[in-house]
Image: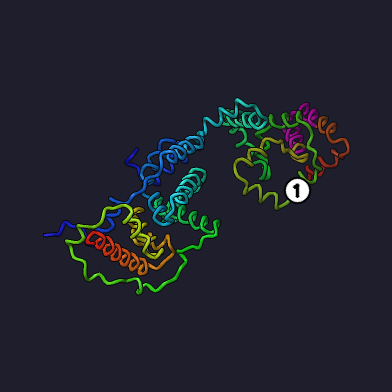
Amino acid sequence: MSALSDEALLARYRAGDGPAFEILYARHRQGLYRFLLGLSGKTELAEEVYQDTWLSLIRSTSQPQGRANFRTWLYQIARNRLIDQWRKHGIHNPLHDSYDEQLHAVGDEAANPEQLLNLSRDHQRLATALHTLPADQREVFLLRAHGELDLPQIATLTETPLETVKSRLRYAQQKLRRLLAEEVLT
Amino acid sequence: MTDARPAPEEQVLEHYREQAPGEPPAHLDAFILAAAHREVPAPKPNLWQRWVRACQKPRWQVAFASLVGVALMLALVQPAPERESAGDFAPKASAPITKKESMQAPASVARSLSTPAPAAPMADFAAPAPSESISAERADEATVSKRAAVPVKTLDEQLREVLRLQNAGQTQAADDLLAALHKRFPKENLSARLKQLQKN
């Protein structure tokens, strides 16, 4: 059964097959949690949204619609729940901030392949570097890194033009590489 | 020759996948999995299981459905009644009876006399409406067989039969038939009608 697609596992769970959910959960638990933790920056909030997301999936009878696959659907639910939580707690939604992409496109001339092998592994530094990114770039990077969504899927999920998604990811990667390399060198 | 190393930007992604902290706490895993087990949708029963379950809780719908089912089965299993005889009667229902035909059917006359009298007025029998005859022609086999089951001998036909019997020297049979017709159509002037038919 572990060879089945996410969509097939969800269908089996909806048809009364309990163990199908366990496989589905094991596949996505870590990626979804890291995405929420990285985007919200708060463990408590990430856990709350994480739990809400899975419970709504358990209790819902719906299926991914149209071209959306299970993974896109799951992250879409999680993203919407996080935005709801921000709204509920009166927290400003950083994903709605508009900014000039070019201002965040810091040049990366100093980087070379050797430096890339020495990226910091310090968890705190990884998290700090991530939070220096604008929220839009951070979201795209997290969806790519932990959600393992491809760029068109991210564009659909965030309702953003594909070219914008590409540039956000590129800027995010360049900045992270620079920040983590610098941290190692100092 | 291809470079197996990922592009520098892809390397950052890989680095985060491998090094980023964060695991959902065990109590959250347990809670979500328990909820999933608790709320696993009940498997949908197949048609047979639903039927058995419905039968276990007797309701009038089930009884009615069973009755209809049995009736349908019986209707299918039973041979079509008198399909051949229906075929014999069918053309007579719509076509005018010729002399030859009336000669061939003395037994059917007697049978028709023993059946109850038709409720419709005689004029309807004597001169069927054109639309009715057209519809009879177009009617399918089932309709024809239904109509054939009803005796359609008109008074005039039976009076012709009386004449035929008289001409054939079977006066006793002719008298019996006439007497029966008198009983059946007491208001009709059968003698006058008989004379009229003789002239024709």
* Residue topped by disc 1: B127
Q: Identify which residue is drawn at 42% across, 40% down.
A: B29
Q: Identify which residue is drawn at 65% across, 34% down.
A: B104
Outermost residue toward the left in this view: B1
**Where's the N terminus of chain A, which quadrant?**
top left
> Which residue occupies the foreground of this view, B164 or A27?
A27
Residue A65 seen in render: no
Residue B162 higher or lower than A102, as above or below:
above
Tell me the chain of label 1: B
- Return the x and y of residue A2 as percentages of the image width and height: 33, 39
**Where's the C terminus of chain A, which quadrant?**
bottom left
Residue B148 higher or lower than B55, as above or below:
below
Residue B80 higher or lower than A179, as above or below:
above
- Return the x and y of residue A116 as percentages of the image width and height: 21, 60
> Which residue occupies the foreground of this view, A96 or B197?
A96
Give the mark count: 1
Q: Identify which residue is drawn at 36% across, 64% down.
A: A133
- Return the x and y of residue B196 as percentages of the image width and height: 81, 44
Q: Quadrant of residue B116?
A: top right
- Return the x and y of residue A146 as percentages of the image width and height: 34, 53
Please check the rendered image and state whether residue B172 is part of the magenta-colored stretch, yes or no: yes
Please check the rendered image and state whether residue B12 is part of the magenta-colored stretch, yes or no: no
Q: Residues within 10 Å of mark 1 (few under 14, many from 20)?
A: few
**Magenta residues, as a range?**
B159-177
Outermost residue toward the front in this view: A186
Left or right: residue A11 compared with residue A186: right
Residue A97 higher or lower than A143, as above or below:
below
> Which residue occupies the foreground of this view, A22 or B173?
A22
Q: Identify which residue is drawn at 39% across, 51% down.
A: A71
Q: Quadrant of residue B81?
A: top right
Kind of residue at badge 1: Ala
